[in-house]
Amino acid sequence: MKKVAFYTLGCKLNFSETSAISRLFEEEGYSKVAFEDQPDIFVINTCSVTDNADKKCKQIVKSAKKISPGSFVVIIGCFAQLKPQEISQIPGVNAVLGAAEKFKLLEHLKDFEANKETIVCASEISNATEFNNAYSKADRTRTFLKVQDGCNYGCAFCTIPLARGKSRSDSTANIIRSAQEIAALDVKEVVLTGVNIGDYGVQNGKRRENFLDLIKELDQVEGIERFRISSIEPNLLSNQIIEFVANSQRFVPHFHIPLQSGSNKILKLMNRRYLRELYVERVEKIKTLMPDACIGVDVITGFPGETHEDFLDTYNFINELNISYLHVFTYSERDNTKAIEMDNPVPYAERQERSNMLRILSEKKKRAFYQSQEGKIAEVLMEGDVKDGKMHGFTANYIKVELPHDENLVNQLMKISLERTTDELTMQVNPIEALQP
């Protein structure tokens, strides 16, 4: 029985797909093992959002070969689709599979015997038209459920359409079946994931369903305590979706809404499909209906043409917004994007300085949000990790809480009192009662 190990870089969508691919191996009799357990095969699922992800891929290959020198190393994922020939030159890589091929890995690589030449199976991205069902299964507390893939947007900085193809979705009926399978595993929380989940409903090139109807159906699935919506574009986050979440028993008051820039000038250069005025409307609508909702924001600094004044426009705009935290990305040049051809690049040191300023602002926003919740009663789902005798969990509105480790609390919903925000930005709490399923 050959042993296979997996390593995932990047987003929640990648984690769901790695888990699904690992189950394909197990169904064929392979033994799934830890990365350090001298596997015969390594499958590395890559990301290519930033340069760091590319470099990380090379480091993981090096580590794999050190652990198991005779192993067969397969690279899949976004980086594999974008740069298959470049990856094939990395020492230790035996095979590279693109977006259309990764779920057929076992068909393309039947014996996993190393050849002198690296195997490259990466067809044009136009061939990636099939939707492959996926959900993560490793963590019994939380599962990432893939509902959509690909993107039809043409943001100037983004390679995802080149790496994953056009927008496509699973059917609502299939997703409900997956959710029911997940419920049978005693998983309490499901995170809906995809590239552009607000665009859910495109099947075989035609729009057949929509995201609002999907979440209404999922809200009826018994056995799942919480559904969490991952990143959703502001122009696709309709008032109807916000109103539904506000009245739902299962969908939690937590939104992650990409902004990318608070400057309308930069938003237009980025080819985003909204202006900042719409973003304000979305935040205000959420906070009116759900005052305790957590709102996360993606922002990119140092985009070509972003002057110091443009950056301050973004900084001040975010500072005034009633949001909870930021994910800050430092712009990096990506091949075959519109942005790489734009004039007036921002010096790298300036990009870093701006990113640092926004990360400090994020900490300030997060601390203010946490402190606004002190003294309130909340429900927390406890995780299985242990550090320094402590375990943690998250409230519905994504506040991280800390308790002394107790194995009996893992994957349990508890009612707690939020007491004090720590310097490390976790919440000290007092348990009130365990909630019976």
Image (tube, rainbow, N blue to C red):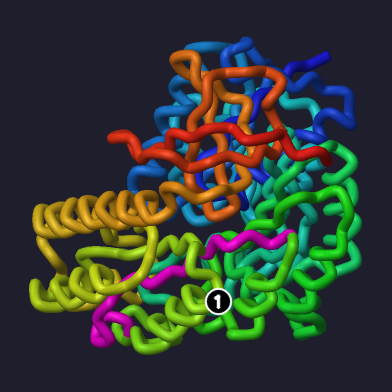
The x and y percentages for residue 380 are: 61, 42
Amino acid at circle 1: Leu
Residue 120: tell me if it is visible: no
Q: Quadrant of residue 426?
A: top left
Q: Quadrant of the N terminus?
A: top right
**Is residue 204 shown left or right of residue 401?**
right
Query: Viewer-proximal residue, 158 or 317?
Result: 317
**Is residue 299 shown left or right of residue 306?**
right
Q: Quadrant of the C terminus?
A: top right
The x and y percentages for residue 299 are: 33, 65
Q: Is residue 311 above or below residue 434?
A: below
Label 1: few (<14), some (14–19) or many (≥20) C-alpha neighbours in 10 Å = some
Range drawn in magenta: 250-267
Residue at 12% x, 54% y is 353
The x and y percentages for residue 142 are: 68, 42
The residue where tag 1 is placed is 289
**Is residue 203 shown left or right of residue 389?**
right
**Is residue 205 shown left or right of residue 417?**
right
The x and y percentages for residue 300 are: 30, 64
Query: Viewer-proximal residue, 193 or 191?
Result: 191
Residue at 62% x, 11% y is 38
- Residue 266 among magenta residues: yes
- Residue 175 among magenta residues: no
Residue 74: tell me if it is visible: yes
Residue at 49% x, 63% y is 292
Residue at 81% x, 35% y is 23
